[in-house]
Image (spheres, coloured by chain):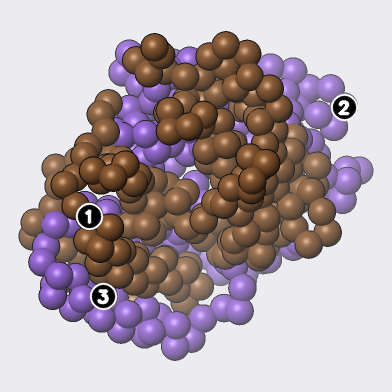
Chain colours: A brown, B purple
Amino acid sequence: MRFTVEDIDTSEVARRKALYGPLTEVVRELIDATIRTEVDDDTIREVHAQVRAATDRLRARQSDGPFGVRFTNDGDGMAWGNAVIGLRNAIAPPLTIARDPDGTHRSQFVLGAAYEGPPGLVHGGICALVLDQILGMTALAGDKPSFTGTLTLRFRRSTPLGPLRAQARVDRVEGVKTFVVGSLSDADGVTVEAEGVFILPAWARE
Amino acid sequence: MRFTVEDIDTSEVARRKALYGPLTEVVRELIDATIRTEVDDDTIREVHAQVRAATDRLRARQSDGPFGVRFTNDGDGMAWGNAVIGLRNAIAPPLTIARDPDGTHRSQFVLGAAYEGPPGLVHGGICALVLDQILGMTALAGDKPSFTGTLTLRFRRSTPLGPLRAQARVDRVEGVKTFVVGSLSDADGVTVEAEGVFILPAWARE
């Protein structure tokens, strides 16, 4: 596993965000429309051919593998392929995670049809996906990477699709282990509680 | 929350699978290509416009909300919007989960660039997502629904992107609670262990 450094400045990062962000956003819309459409069969087949052609154009030149995590010379991280926060990953809602002065991390986001498990409800595993990301980012001490050791989720009640909030804070640190607690909430309060133990990888220890 | 019954027969289900399955599959490819493409800026903008047009065509007639879980008169389930197994959900890898005679559930699948967390590795929360689904399906007694009560994941080592396997089995049943254990593996063995407690919802109890 490796992190890549790209020799680009802040304005180039902004330019790429403006280029790739809107493309990813419309692919997110397409995912939603593919689930919900009720148009006739011929239209489905024609759209299939259009999406096939668009995909082939993008594949004309592409990286051999996944996006990875890239940094600029200034140390700005570009986790653009990330399944939860990735600017270029249409699977990601994406979450924008902010840090309070006291270290608490928070995010507000909306989950639509693509994140469904039981009818009208967020898939339990999607709750886990979102919480793993925000707990993991909270566990980061400075800019050190961390890996999930254990993650425990308590589903207190169903989480409805729609506007949601997540938050997390460090409970305690013991050596290379950071214990983080967090939760997922809808307008009526907490739906899922999470506790994670995050571990500093051996290669990042001093 | 409700399940929907559609008055369609097996051949109509097959017809819909043949219509929607390939569309969803090419949208999955588009997600991957959006992450990995290195084509020039003008092509990105043109593809953006093409995907916008394709999405608008699908949205010309669509359901008001998420897909839900629908059943045929024969009792066949169509969880086509599901985030892990959904035939019409491009976020889903999708997993096909088979049941052994002894009740063990298994799945083999491939996770590509769209499921990345750390560089080259499966996002920890995606491991949780997959395991929640297979453990939940294993917890089903007969065709009764079940909800995740708690889910505990132990990440033994990193999970590489690529071909993977998941499995789960019921450990024990205590009243309305079913305890299920499972794991995620790559070619070298287990990467993540999971234990889940699944609960029969009150409305489904006799």
- Label 2 to label 1: alpha-carbon separation: 60 Å
User: Which residue is farthest right?
Assistant: B206
Name the residue rendered at 39%, 22% in the picture: B158
Name the residue rendered at 27%, 26% in the picture: A1
- Which quadrant, please, contains the N terminus of chain B? bottom right
The x and y percentages for residue B137 are 61, 37
Assess disc 3: are there few (<14), some (14-19) or many (≥20) residues with their C-alpha within 10 Å of its C-alpha.
Answer: many
Q: Amino acid at mark 2?
A: Gly
The x and y percentages for residue B144 are 74, 43
| Res. A9 mark | 1
* Residue position for label 2: B175
Left-right relation of B188 to A50: right
Q: Return the residue nearer the eye: A20 or A59.
A: A20
Name the residue rendered at 59%, 47% in the picture: A99
Q: Return the residue nearer the eye: A34 or B14.
A: A34
Q: Return the residue nearer the eye: A120 or A162.
A: A162
Q: Amino acid at mark 3?
A: His
